Amino acid sequence: MSQMERLVVVGVDQNYSHYGVYKPQITGKFPEVTSAPDIIMTQYSINNPGTYVRAYCSFNIPAIDIVAAIKADLEDITYSSHRNFNVNEEELALCRARIQAIPFGQNETSAISLQYLTHNNPCTVGEVFNLNFRQELRIVGDYTDFINSFSIAPIWIYADSPVNIQQILSHDHIYGEVRNEDDFRFTDLMAWFQGHLHIFRVRWRISDIIVMTVIGREAANPSRLLNGLLKNFKNSEELVTIVKKVNDNFDIWDSDRSISWYKYPAVKLQMLEVERKIRRFNFGSLPIFHFSSEIM
């Protein structure tokens, strides 16, 4: 959940995945699922602006049903989440009007220079990329790491100058940790971009940052987002360790599948302990990642 009151729901199962952005019913609150007692929810406490995580899981309910229960009463804003996210709609309208008044840019050959556009017109780099995300502009050129490549808009922009990540991302919307020596090769970050969660990778040796998820087709990203969350944050490691015990317990149950695992005493006792730990677990807020301005 972000400080701009967006709730991202990600679900991943063997043959199922889901990504959606929703408007919370109650400000500063995650959904409480009461319709299915077998859905286990972690604790959370929202005290300050930030991005918080809550896990919903079950030993026997598939992800598709868990997701359905979470979003049952929520307003789906997946396809409008970019609006009013790090942009002022009135200022964006001025930028749009100025671009539309330029007498060229109708094809790749006559594409409008991004450098010209941002230096000589009332447009910021962030506004240009927001219009590209909305598929109102098509961006080509040498610096296109953060574009919506699916845009087929009739107005072409040529990215002829490097884009500093801090021109398109708010500093308090970037999350990550450097926790071991391997991280000095690269660090994966989770960040809000155009109203959606994405994974970015900083490659320290060459001082650049690349996108690891798909911009403009966010439905393709659930597995990448879940892996990014579980592998790159210290708080997640504890939950992963707890959940791993579930698989260990099911290995015990594999020796006797003639009865339900819930009726299998050795497994049931362990499962109840795992459930208790999950219910007490609290992710807290994701840590803001600070990096130097030379990262492009």
Image (tube, helix red, strand yellow):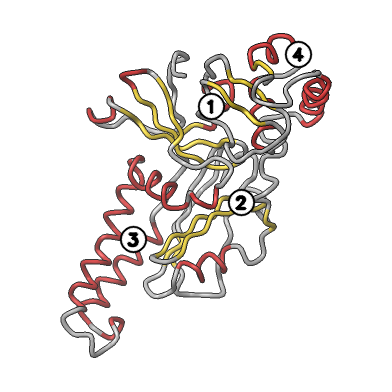
The residue at the far front in this view is 109
Which type of secondary structure does the marked residue at label 3 adopt? Answer: helix
Q: Which residue in the protein does label 4 denote?
A: 121
Q: Which residue in the protein does label 2 denote?
A: 21
Instruction: Give x and y (percent) for residue 61.
Output: 44, 74
Instruction: Give x and y (percent) for residue 110.
Output: 69, 19
Mark-to-mark CA distance, 2 and 4: 33 Å
Q: Which one is earlier in the sequence, the residue at label 2 or at label 4?
A: 2
The circle drawn on residue 277 is 3
Mark-to-mark CA distance, 4 and 3: 56 Å
From the viewer's side, name the closer residue of 98 and 2: 98
Instruction: Give x and y (percent) for residue 10.
Output: 50, 55
Of circles 4 and 3, which is in front? Answer: 4
Mark-to-mark CA distance, 4 and 1: 21 Å
Tell me which residue sits at (41%, 69%) in the image: 58
Q: Amino acid at mark 4?
A: Asn
- Contact between marks 4 and 3 (CB within 8 A): the answer is no
From the viewer's side, name the closer residue of 271 and 117: 117
Mark-to-mark CA distance, 1 and 3: 44 Å
Q: Which residue in the protein does label 1 denote?
A: 144
